[in-house]
Image (cartoon, helix red, strand yellow):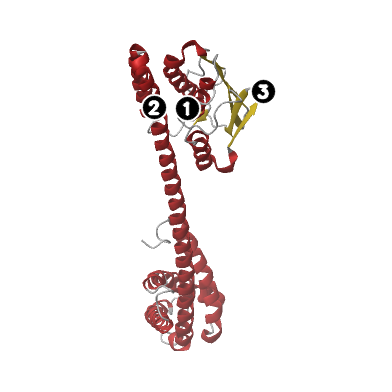
Amino acid sequence: MHPILARGSRLALYLGVWTLVGVLLAALLAGPGGLTGTRSLVISIPLALVYAFFCLSAWYVARSTPLGPTGGMRLVATAVTASVISSAVWLIVARGWLELVASGIGVAPGRLFPALRALIFGFGILLYLLSLTVSYLLAAFERSREAERRGLEAQVLAREAELRSLRTQIDPHFLFNCLHSISALTTADPPAARRMCVLLGGFLRDSLALGSEERITIGRELQLARRFLEIERVRFGDRLTIEANALEDGRWLVPPLLLQPIVENAVTHGVAHVLEGGTIRISVSNTDAWLTIDIDNPCDPDRPRRTGTGLGLSNVRARLRAIYGDQARVTAAESGGAWTVQVILPAEAARDPSPDTGIAST
C-alpha cells in the first residue's frame, strides 16, 4: 500500500498541501481566463485534489526505476513519459470540469478551455515531476532506514550470539573443576563423592532452569552461589565458610550465574591454597543507579600462579561488556592476604521481586 494511504493523518496532510496547490493554480488561472478569485478557486481546488491522486502513482514509478540500478536515459524517459501521460489525463478531466461549471460561474461554455489548456497541461507536468522527485527522496530515506534497521538487527544478533557463547563456557569450566574434585574423592572418601554428585545434579538442574532468563534477582543469584559452595564443602569441610549480607530490597537484577565463576575462583585459587581454609564474604550494596558486589576470600601470597585456564574473570568481564557496554566494571586486587573482586553494574529493578534476598552465613 502507498505510505500516504496507509494512515488517515498522512492522507489528510497530503490533501491539505494539494489544497494550497489549488490556491496557487487559481492565481495562475485568473490571468489568462479572466476569472475572479472565487471563480478560479471553484475551478482549481477540485482539479488540484483530483490530480493529487494522479500524482500518487509517482511513488510506484520511483520504486520501479530506482536511482542506482537504472540508467540516466531510462530515468529521464520514464519521468517525462509518466508526467506527460498524467498531465494529459488531467487535462481531459479539466476539460470536462470546465464545461460542467462554466454555466454555474457565469462563463460561456467552450471559452475557458482553449485559453487554459496550455497552462493546465504545463502545470500538470511540473507538478508530476515534483511529486516524482519527492517520491525518490522518500524512497532513498526508506532504504536508508531499512539499512539502518538491518544493521541494528545484525548488532543485536551478534551480541546475542556472543552472550550465548559466553554462557556455554560457564558449564564446561565449572564441570571440569567439579569432576576433578569428585575424581579425587572417589578413592579417598566414596560417600563424600556420592554426596557431591547428588549436590552437583541439583545445582545443574537449577542452573538449567535459568537458560531462558536474561536476568534474575540478586537473591536467587546468591542462592546459586550457596549451592555451589555446598558442593565444595563436601571436599573442604569446615575449612570453607561463607558470609553474605541480605539486601533489604531484593528486587535488583543481575545476569544469571554472574557470581559462580568468581566464587569458584575464590575456592580454587584462594581457600584451596590456605592450610586452615577461610571465609568467602559476599557483600552487596546498592544505590538508585548502581549495584555493587564485593567478593573477598583469603589467599596465600606464595600460592602457585596461573594454575587455571583464566576463564573465570575474563568470562564475567566479557558478559558484562556485552550486556552493559562500558557501564559495568570488574576489578580484582590482592591486599593483606585477601583477594577482592568488585563488580559494579547498573541497577535494574524487577517488577515482581523474589522474596529471597540473600543467603545466611555458612
204 or 334, which is in the foreground?
334
Marks 1 and 2 in Cβ contact (< 8 Å): yes
SS at badge 2: helix
Crowd class of label 1 (few under 14; some 14 to 19; many from 20; radius 10 Å): many
Quadrant of the image for the N terminus? bottom left
Residue 112's place in the image compared with 192, above or below, is below
- Give the Cα distance between marks 1 and 2: 10 Å
Mark 1, residue position:
260
Residue 77 lies in what quarter of the image?
bottom left
Q: Residue at x 39, y 70 (%)?
A: 63
Mark 2, residue position:
207
Residue 346 lies in what quarter of the image?
top right
Please name the amino acid that badge 1 sits on. Answer: Gln
Mark 3, residue position:
336
SS at badge 1: helix
Chain-order first, disc 1 or disc 3: 1
**Is 346 displayed left or right of 118 in the figure?**
right
Q: Residue at x 44, y 48 (%)?
A: 158
- Residue 129 position, x and y percent, is 47, 78
